[in-house]
Image (cartoon, helix red, strand yellow):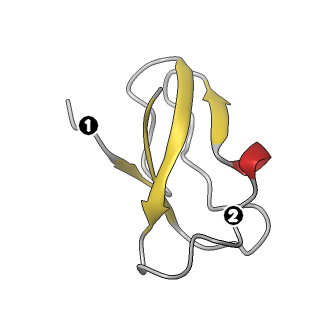
Amino acid sequence: MADRFKTGEKAPEKGTYQFDGLVDGGSENDVTEDEKHIELENGGQFPPIRSNKEAAYWKKA
């Protein structure tokens, strides 16, 4: 199992995931604290960052 997941990929298991960077390497300063943690079900799709719709990396919290 990978340690890092990208926007659009499926969650391997239910749980809390935390933001781990922007895919394009852009500024992370605009990412709010409430966007940095998400809850996903098994098979749920990793989302982009809500505020700017940018693709992100996620890791299991």
Quick one: label 1, few (<14), some, or many (20+) residues within 10 Å?
few
- Distance between the alpha carbons at the discs numbered 1 and 2: 21 Å
The residue indicated by pointer 2 is 31
Identity, as a three-letter code, of the amino acid under mark 1: Asp
The residue indicated by pointer 1 is 3
Classify mark 2: helix, strand or loop.
loop
Q: Residue at x 49, y 57 (%)?
A: 7
Q: Residue at x 64, y 71 (%)?
A: 29
Q: Is residue 40 left or right of residue 22?
A: right
Classify mark 1: helix, strand or loop.
loop
Q: Which mark is residue 15?
A: none
Where is residue 30 shown, x and y percent of the image? 71, 72
Quick one: label 2, few (<14), some, or many (20+) residues within 10 Å?
some
Question: Which of the pair 5/43 is nearer the observer?
Answer: 5
Q: Quadrant of the N terminus?
A: top left
Nearer to us of marks 1 and 2 is 2
Q: Residue at x 45, y 61 (%)?
A: 21
Question: Which of the pair 45/17 is nearer the observer?
Answer: 17
Where is residue 46 shown, x and y percent of the image? 54, 47
Relative to 60, does residue 57 appear above or below in the rendering? below
